[in-house]
């Protein structure tokens, strides 16, 4: 178990919170065993970060200077400003984007139905999953960048719906998710500061607008191609003669 949790920690360090919640509330193991599992998980997961730590000579000052602009509204790199309402709007939009517009409506209606029909008690039996969902959403609110961060939220919500509702709702959501591979429904039209895909993706304004957009397969392929193009430009500049691939 600790080996697999260590690999999870190596993928994303924020998984440490979910691992701790899982060990405490799901397994309900005693403190010594909990501590042993968590230390072992941390050591295994820490191996993934060891090359980076060696490259900065385990310097706290070097580590402390690393900044991320993701999820924060900024005017320049020296002045990061966290805006609550901007964070909230991006947070809500990206959750809807992760599930898809129609599946998000179905999920909202199902949860309203659960509460109207007095089913909260049934929902609360999934307390471990709910705690992980809430903690994951809290982390995502602080840094609403890549929707992959809330993959755990998507998986657990689908699992809860599968057990508490009729399967036909799940089939409808799966159908719309498959359709979104080829054509997607969007409700927000966002304008970005830069059209160059190699520049930071910084939104300057947005408006509510219902429209059909490209499918996720097309977006994925375009993004992958842009990443390759940008890597050819940026890597030689950042790494000099260590860069081996020529244009």
Image (tube, rainbow, N blue to C red):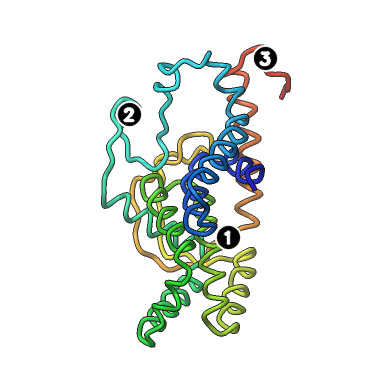
Which residue is pictured at 52% across the width and 75% down the height?
A: 161
Q: Residue at x 30, y 33 (%)?
A: 80
Image position of 213 (left or right of 48): left
Q: Label 1: state its secondary structure.
A: strand
Earlier in the chain: of badge 3 and badge 2, it is: 2
> What SS does tag 2 mark?
strand
Q: Going from the N terminus, do you reach mark 2 or mark 1 first?
A: 2
Q: Which residue is mark 1?
A: 214
State whether residue 241 is above or below residue 124. Answer: above
Q: Position of residue 3 (x, y in %)?
A: 66, 42
Check disc 2 and report the residue beneath it: 76
Whether the residues at callouts 3 and 2 have beta carbons within 8 Å, the answer is no
Badge 2: residue crowd in 10 Å (few <14, some 14–19, many ≥20): few
Most foreground residue, 149 or 21: 21
Q: Marks 3 and 1, how far apart in space?
A: 38 Å
Badge 3: few (under 14), some or many (20 or more) residues near its Cα, within 10 Å? few
Q: Residues within 10 Å of mark 1 (few under 14, many from 20)?
A: some
Local secondary structure at mark 3: helix
Q: Position of residue 177 (x, y in %)?
A: 60, 68
> For mark 3, what is the residue?
242
């Amino acid at each position: 178990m600790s080996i697999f949790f260590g690999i999870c920690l190596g993928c994303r360090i924020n998984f440490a919170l979910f691992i701790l919640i899982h060990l405490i509330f799901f397994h309900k193991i005693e403190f010594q065993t909990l501590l042993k599992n968590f230390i072992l998980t941390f050591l295994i997961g820490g191996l993934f970060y060891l090359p980076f730590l060696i490259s900065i000579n385990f310097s706290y000052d070097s580590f402390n200077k690393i900044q991320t602009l993701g999820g924060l509204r900024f005017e320049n790199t020296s002045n990061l400003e966290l805006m609550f309402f901007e964070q909230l709007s991006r947070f809500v939009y990206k959750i809807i984007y992760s599930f898809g517009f129609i599946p998000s409506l179905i999920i909202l209606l199902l949860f309203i139905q659960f509460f109207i029909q007095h089913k909260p008690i049934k929902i609360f039996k999934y307390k471990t999953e709910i705690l992980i969902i809430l903690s994951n959403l809290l982390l995502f609110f602080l840094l609403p960048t890549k929707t992959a961060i809330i993959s755990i939220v998507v998986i657990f919500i689908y699992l809860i719906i599968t057990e508490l509702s009729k399967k036909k709702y799940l089939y409808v959501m799966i159908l719309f998710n498959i359709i979104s591979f080829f054509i997607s429904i969007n409700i927000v039209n966002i304008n970005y500061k830069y059209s160059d895909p190699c520049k930071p993706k910084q939104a300057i304004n947005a408006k509510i607008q219902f429209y059909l957009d490209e499918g996720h397969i097309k977006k994925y392929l375009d993004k992958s191609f842009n990443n390759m193009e940008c890597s050819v430009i940026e890597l030689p500049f950042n790494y000099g003669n260590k860069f081996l691939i020529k244009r």
